[in-house]
Amino acid sequence: MSRGSHNGVGTGRYTEAERRREPQRVILIIGNAGTISESLIHALEREFPWVVVEQVEHVRAAFNVFSHPVSLILVDLALIDEAEEKSAELLHAHPQALAAVIEPHDRSLDATLVRVPESSLVRSVLPMNLRLDVWLSVIRLMLSGGEYLPPGLILRAKRNGHSTALPSGSRSDEARFAELTAREMQILEMVSRGLQNKLIAAEFRLSEHTVKIHLHNIITKLGAHNRTEAAARFRSLKERH
């Protein structure tokens, strides 16, 4: 099912000239109609005017050629096993895309989701129980190449004795920093200089919610307790190099 683009006015985050310059991209939903509600799809189209939302009900239909490059694939939890089995084909069909599994009800996550960091396809989890502004910030993060794991997933993994979703204590700082994206390194560098979220958001033209999500990912990947510790490790790493 093709949604096409929405021509309504956005939230004011982007000027008309910026919208025209932004390359058209596709968010591909693999799941039954209603996996993501119509109201949320309309919110996506308003927030990201360059996005075309496409939906298919079967994994095999996701191999189609769409109107624009696919930047983000959102997979229904019920189809995750099949999507994993065909991950090589999906990634070949959409080499620019990142993938996330849709987590509908914040229920207990099974071993498949706990092993998200080991997945050959899925790099993030998209919770559906977030406030709209936070939910859109998570989507924005993913469209920018970032990854997101809900704090609840990490807490469950700890309680259940799983370590695969968590940073390993045996890894060196260099290995941990190697997992950060370019944007996460930029944000961490600014945090290390003492800049607050509002100024960081303005520098990169992001929302403060998106900066907070980036910081959550940074702290998780580094195995730090807070931003202060993450910044201290960053400064220590720079001094060693």
Image: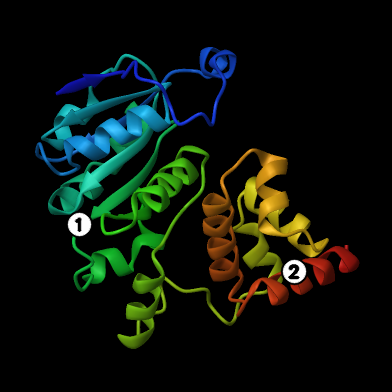
Q: Residue at x 45, y 31 (%)?
A: 11
Image position of 10 (left or right of 172): left
Locate the N terminus by quadrant: top left
Please tell me how crowded label 2 is: few (under 14), some (14-19), or many (20+) other residues with Cα within 10 Å: many
Q: Residue at x 44, y 56 (%)?
A: 148
Q: Amino acid at mark 1?
A: Pro
Classify 232 as above or below 158.
Answer: above
Question: Which residue carries the number 2 mark?
Answer: 231
Please tell me how crowded label 1 is: few (under 14), some (14-19), or many (20+) other residues with Cα within 10 Å: some
Q: Is residue 94 visible?
A: no
Image position of 174 (left or right of 241): left
Classify 77 as above or below 8.
Answer: below
Based on the displayed image, in which of its 4 quarters is residue 15 positioned?
A: top right
Q: Position of residue 66 (x, y in %)?
A: 29, 18
Q: Position of residue 46 (x, y in %)?
A: 37, 28
Q: On residue 207, which mark appears?
A: none
Q: Position of residue 162 (x, y in %)?
A: 35, 80
